[in-house]
Amino acid sequence: MSQTFRQARRSQSLYRRACQVFPGGVTRATITFDTHPTYMAAGSGARVLDVDGNEYIDFANNFTTLIHGHAFPPVVAAVQEQLTSGSCFANPTETEIELAELICARVPGIEAIRFVTSGTEAVMFAIKAARTFTGRQKIAKLEGTYHGAYDWAEVSETVPPDRRGGAVRPVPNYRGTPNAVLDDVVVVPFNDVKRAAEILDRHGDSLAAMLIDVMPSRPGLIPLSQDFVALLNDFSASTGALIISDEVLNFRAALHGAAAAFGLNAKLFSLGKIIGGGFAVGAVAGAREVMDVFSTREARLLPQGGTFAANPVTMVAGRACLQHLNAPDYARIADLGSHARRGIRAVRERTGADISVTGQGSLFRIHPKSDPPRTYAEFYQTPEQSSDLKNILSGLAHRGILLSNTGLAALSTPMGPAEIDAFLSSLEETLKERVAA
Ligand SMILES: Cc1ncc(COP(=O)(O)O)c(C=O)c1O
């Protein structure tokens, strides 16, 4: 696929219209490589078509959500059937029990669950549940990690490394963040056991929870090391600070979820993305004794509602998505992930370009650096490197390969070796073109 010129007239005109009604011309963070976003018209399987008629292989998959790609027939059939019977009710429906049973049966550590409508809400309710259960306010999180838009969860998200190479000072994510938020967040470096232990020990038993993503995408898609996970487990066991496994993104890591795959002893989980089969979703889940804070049967300790929570359209889509996602499917897309990571390293060898890759399973992330980052400091990009990455992603998009704008790629079940090879040859062409220029 060596098509390098792409029409964008209709996208440009839509963007001009959008600028009249949306601040900055967009209504959420989206993929924008050049001067305007590319507006999509349709998607099917691993491919999407933009409004100007250009086709792409979609490695963004709505920020990792679409594990079966676009318009997955079992999801389409389930949703079509549900729509003819109504899209939402104030009453519960059987559909929510079916999806909950499926997740509880699959994930060790999830005994009870409550559905919400986004990963942000799932993280928020997990933090609230931990606070209610422990009676403590503070949370700990890892430097540079993204967990959605709840104030406490978004502290120190995009911060330049400090002198020691980390980003552990609680830094507000937006002007006007209440000081009280910063006072109640402890930021911990990842994969630095000694320093993390020093910081955690200072807060001893005042922590309600540690909000953990086992392979956080924002600071580089670098997996947590086994000794770091052991530190978190030990600290949780000795202080009562509950581990929240934020699996909004990394639930796609394995059939039994990310905490099980990494040996993280989580009492609470936040889920989202793939469990909704392509529809708006989130879920807070975990051990029954903790989840009982949501119970409305006795004194309700923690109120939780949501107009569209557990709406049957999302529930049937999520069920269809997960029912068609079994151990062999995970193994197959993980193999494709290994193929892609190996291929990127080979492209680096052949071109000599500054490119490296991190990730595991069905996820990988490219970095505009010669060596794969292992720490926050190694991950952090200079303005030149950020602009390099933007150009590489734009070169890929012009060749019909779509990645998220951080360089994150998520594989889907309709993909095969042909899609990975198309990505690798486009990457090689893009890098060679850059070297020549
Ligand atoms: C780890 C993690 N937590 C939470 C969220 C927020 O989820 P949502 O965008 O559904 O609010 C995301 C979204 O990308 C995420 O990656």
Image (cartoon, grey):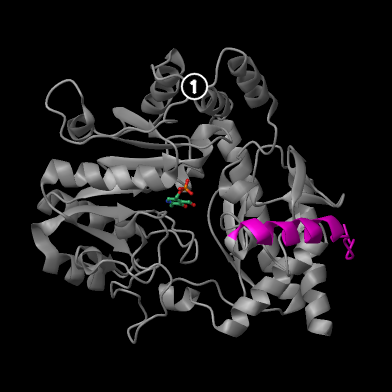
Estimate how packed mark 1 is, as few (under 14), some (14 to 19) or many (20 or more) residues with alpha carbons within 10 Å: some
Using the image as rendered, state which of residue 388 and residue 421 is in the foreground: 388
**Looking at the image, which residue is at 71% across and 78% down?**
353
**Looking at the image, which residue is at 39% across and 17% down?**
92
Q: Kindly indicate the quadrant of the structure image that contains residue 114.
A: top left
Q: Please tell me how many numbered marks the rendered image carries.
A: 1
Q: For the N terminus, which image quadrant?
A: bottom right
Q: For the C terminus, which image quadrant?
A: bottom right
Magenta span has 13?
A: yes
Q: Left or right? Give the position of 289 relative to 65.
A: left
**Looking at the image, which residue is at 62% across and 84% down?**
384
SS for callout 1: loop
Q: Kindly indicate the quadrant of the structure image that contains residue 12.
A: bottom right
Q: Left or right? Give the position of 171 relative to 435.
A: left
Please tell me whether residue 246 is drawn above or below residue 86 in the rendered image: below
**Residue 242 coordinates in the image, percent (x, y):** 20, 47
Please tell me whether residue 298 is drawn above or below residue 147 in the rendered image: above
Direction front: furthest residue: 20
What residue is pinned by disc 1? 88
Please tell me whether residue 267 is drawn above or below residue 91 in the rendered image: below
**Residue 321 coordinates in the image, percent (x, y):** 57, 29
Q: Identify the magenta region.
A: 1-22
Using the image as rendered, state which of residue 412 and residue 6 is in the foreground: 6
Q: Kindly indicate the quadrant of the structure image that contains residue 433.
A: bottom right
Magenta span has 297?
A: no
Q: Please indicate, yes or no, whether residue 357 appears anywhere in the rendered image.
A: yes
Q: What's the residue type where badge 1 is placed?
A: Cys
**Looking at the image, which residue is at 35% across and 54% down?**
150
**Residue 66 coordinates in the image, percent (x, y):** 61, 40
